Image (cartoon, rainbow, N blue to C red):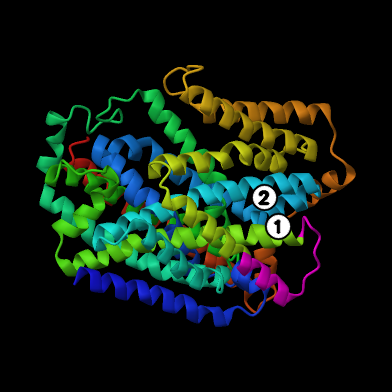
Amino acid sequence: MAVTIFVIVLLLYVVIGGILTRFVKNSDDFYVMGGKGSTLLIVGTLAATYLSATTLLGIAGQSYAEGPLVIAALGSFGAWLGTLLAVIYVGRKMKALGCKTMPDYFEKRFNNKWVSVVATLIMIVGLIGYGVTQFIGAGLVLSEMTNINFELLVVLFTIALIVFTAFGGMYGVVVTDTIMFFTMLAISVVIAPMIIGQAGFDQMKSLSETIPGYWTIAGAENRPLGWSISQFLVWILFFTCIPALVSRVFPAKNDFVILKTAIIGVFFAPFMQLIVFIAAGGMQVLDPNITPTDNAMVVGFMEYTPPAVAGIGLAALMASIMSTASTLFVLVGFALSRDVYEKIFEKDLDEKQRLSTARIGQVVVAVIICIISIFQPSAIYWISIYAGSIFAVGWLPTIVASFEWKRMNSKAALVSMIMGVATFILFGELIRVGVITVPEGVDELMIAICFSVGSLIVAALLTKPNSYELQYYSKMKQTSMAKQTINEFLKKPNGLAEIKKQYKQIIVTAVVVTLISVGIWGYFFIQLGLG
């Protein structure tokens, strides 16, 4: 029964994705859903993208082995803050400037071909690396269920995803993400609590007696506090500018939708995630010998829930993988077609040609990710960290400086991006082979971010922005989503009353979500004896 339910739900995703292709009439629909995204759709796609294979397999495996607090206390908290910044700070500013992709911003801000080339390459490499984690996760889940060859499953999964990414674009991804989001809620609301209930809070608390440090932020490996802090920094830095999250803002209808998404979406992300981590701790009680640890939650679904529930749970787990992977397909397809082929090579395409090149780009990327995934180059968690770090060291300093510093220019951007990525790779390899050693809690990302920021400041002080960069900086400072939305509403009958109504809804939403959060996390805090 579990396999039957699983297959039915997956086929439903693919069919819906195929149907949605009829709504794509032009490139604007394909790239940003025509700017029609409601609060429900943007919350759904944000939360669905956040909850990926990295969470349900990689980090759940870490939580199972070392204890939930190792990642949850600092790593996940950093990710939540990064997500909030991605929506409110980065995504909101870029949408106000009319960006359809993140490389759009680099082109608008600097009007420099080489800045656009380097920024786009960073995006493609980073997203391909992050996409690999989703495919490995998909293969693990399906092979665990069916005993079918891992390589064949990855190929089939690639074909299924292409159905609603290469044809539906952002329209297809956002709507299917939202449907998948409700499926994923089943894991956190029903299935994870079932596993926790079977394990029992008392038995879970007693794990610290047999596994020292299990319920501490040092974890079972007794990692130093510096390591946990470094994880906090890693996640907050790359979540702030990772395209998979920032791009969720671009289809939003208006600024009210973005603000509500920041409140509701950032609540659901940790809600769905942390309960999974606690359930992974429960699996340590129920089955302490799971290998590889990435399969902890898969074993939980298959062996500790009824068949029908297991089928729903595995379909929900697969939904989390599909939602993130489909987003990456679309974004890299955008990068290859819009940001490389159209702009860098200066191709003048009509609407039909734009759609064709975007779809071809996504198919190419899907094949590349599929091939890499088949070889399973590393553990899921560490691949995601490495890929995500590329954005932290390559993009974040340039984005923040370009938002806030009038002196920022294309030369400083190029130096910072190249220096950040180069030093990250160089020091990472030197540390791994033992050529150099660093203090506990210091890793290549911290070193590289210092080089990226330092080189940016020096280059900006030694050079000057040109007239275009100064003019665009001034224009950017005068542009905001709030102003655009207010002006849009004031054009409507009773526009002022509608604005007041929307602001009241935002305040009420914030208060309600805060109270619910305190209740939920207070309950687990007390039950697990963490107070």
- Taking 434 as reference, is 400 above or below it? below
Q: Please tell me which residue is depicted at 79% across the width and 48% down the height of the picture.
A: 113
Instruction: Decide which of 90, 375 is in the foreground and name it.
Output: 375
Q: Please tell me which residue is depicted at 65% across the width and 54% down the height of the picture.
A: 102
- Quarter the C terminus occupies: top left
The residue carrying mark 2 is 120
Asked whether residue 409 appears in the rendered view, the answer is no
| Label 2: few (<14), some (14–19) or many (≥20) C-alpha neighbours in 10 Å | many
44 vs 357, left or right, is left
Rendered image quadrant of residue 224 = top left
In the image, residue 385 lies in the stretch drawn in magenta: no
The residue carrying mark 1 is 339
| Label 1: few (<14), some (14–19) or many (≥20) C-alpha neighbours in 10 Å | many
In the image, residue 359 lies in the stretch drawn in magenta: yes
Rendered image quadrant of residue 205 = top left
Q: Are marks 1 and 2 in contact (CB under 8 Å)?
A: yes
Q: Please tell me which residue is depicted at 49% across the width and 73% down the height of the picture.
A: 163
Q: What secondary structure is marked by label 2?
A: helix
Number of on-image labels? 2
Q: Please tell me which residue is depicted at 74% across the width and 38% down the height of the picture.
A: 414
Residue 278, position as x, y percentages in the image: 24, 46
Instruction: Decide which of 216, 315 is in the foreground and name it.
Output: 315
216 vs 323, left or right, is left
Residue 464, position as x, y percentages in the image: 85, 34
Look at label 1 and name its amino acid: Asp
Cα distance in 3D space between marks 1 and 2: 7 Å
**What residue span does the magenta drawing correspond to?**
343-360
